[in-house]
């Protein structure tokens, strides 16, 4: 699943570790989500979006999911 996490981190001058600490996960998880190897749980997606004051849909691209 595509997402804007890396772009948002860079805009906010955040490292992967800083974001991970802020949302209660590991740097490795943030890395995996950024490169599309891991899909964030709903709870984690909410925490990431909320951290950036955005909706989940503004951070994660659901357009390629099947109905």
Image (cartoon, grey):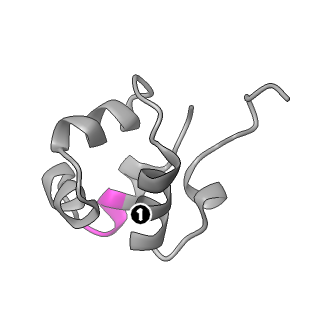
- Furthest toward the bottom, the residue is 53
On-image quarter of the N terminus: top right
Q: Secondary structure at mark 1?
A: helix
Figure quadrant of residue 29: top left
In this picture, residue 34 sits left or right of residue 16: right
Give the image location of residue 13, x and y in percent. 23, 66
The secondary structure making up most of the magenta span is helix
What residue is rendered at 62% in x and 60% in y? 58
Q: Residues within 10 Å of mark 1 (few under 14, many from 20)?
A: some
In this picture, residue 57 sits left or right of residue 46: right
Decide which of 10, 16 is in the foreground and name it.
Answer: 16
Over which residues does the magenta segment extend? Answer: 9-13
Give the image location of residue 50, x and y in percent. 46, 71
What residue is rendered at 52% in x and 49% in y? 42
Is residue 66 within the magenta segment? no
On-image quarter of the C terminus: top right
Which residue was labeled with disc 1?
47
Figure quadrant of residue 10: bottom left
Figure quadrant of residue 9: bottom left
Is residue 12 within the magenta segment? yes
> Considering only vertical position in the picture, is 6 above or below 36?
below
What residue is rendered at 49% in x and 61% in y? 46
């Amino acid at each position: 699943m595509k997402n804007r996490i890396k772009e948002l981190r860079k805009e906010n001058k955040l490292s992967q570790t800083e974001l991970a600490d802020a949302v209660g996960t590991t740097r490795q998880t943030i890395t995996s989500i950024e490169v599309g190897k891991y899909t964030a749980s709903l709870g984690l997606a909410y925490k990431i979006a909320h951290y950036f004051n955005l909706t989940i849909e503004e951070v994660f691209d659901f357009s390629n999911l099947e109905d």
